[in-house]
Image: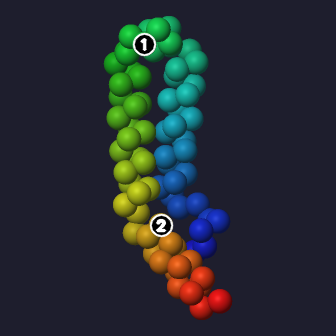
Amino acid sequence: MSLTETTTEERQAQKTYNALLAHLDDCSPCQSEEDCAEGTRIRRAVRATRSAVTESPALRAARAQARMATRDE
């Protein structure tokens, strides 16, 4: 796996973030900084998916492989 490939976790994080942006565009309470239940749920999901990306074994392995390849050059 190379760093240019996206992991499942990264794709899910992007999908969740896109859902948050779409929600914010359509939600009057969220636009006026009065959080709604749906917005809160989506923000929590965004944080959870970002954590999954940060802690992803596949991403850590790809980064380690890239570091090793850089050292060998």
Element at label 2:
helix
Which quadrant, please, contains the C terminus? bottom right
To which residue does mark 1 refer?
Answer: 33
Confirm or deny contact between disc 1 and disc 2 (CB under 8 A).
Answer: no
CA gap, disc 1 and disc 2: 34 Å
Sequence-first disc among 1 and 2: 1
Q: Nearer the viewer, mark 1 or mark 2?
A: 1
Q: Using the rendered view, name the quadrant where residue 35 is placed.
A: top left
Q: Position of residue 12 (x, y in %)?
A: 50, 48
Viewer-side residue, 65 vs 56: 65
| Amino acid tagged 1 | Glu
Residue 41 vs 32, above or below: the answer is below
| Amino acid tagged 2 | Leu
Q: Position of residue 69 (x, y in %)?
A: 59, 85
> Label 1 crowding class (10 Å Cα cut-off): few <14, some 14-19, many 20+?
few
> Label 2 crowding class (10 Å Cα cut-off): few <14, some 14-19, many 20+?
many
- Please indicate whether residue 47 sits to the left or right of residue 8 in the image: left
Mark number for residue 59?
Answer: 2
Element at label 1:
loop
Residue displayed at 47% across by 8% down: 32
Residue displayed at 50% across by 12% down: 31
Q: Position of residue 36 (x, y in %)?
A: 37, 15
- Please indicate whether residue 18 sits to the left or right of residue 46 in the image: right
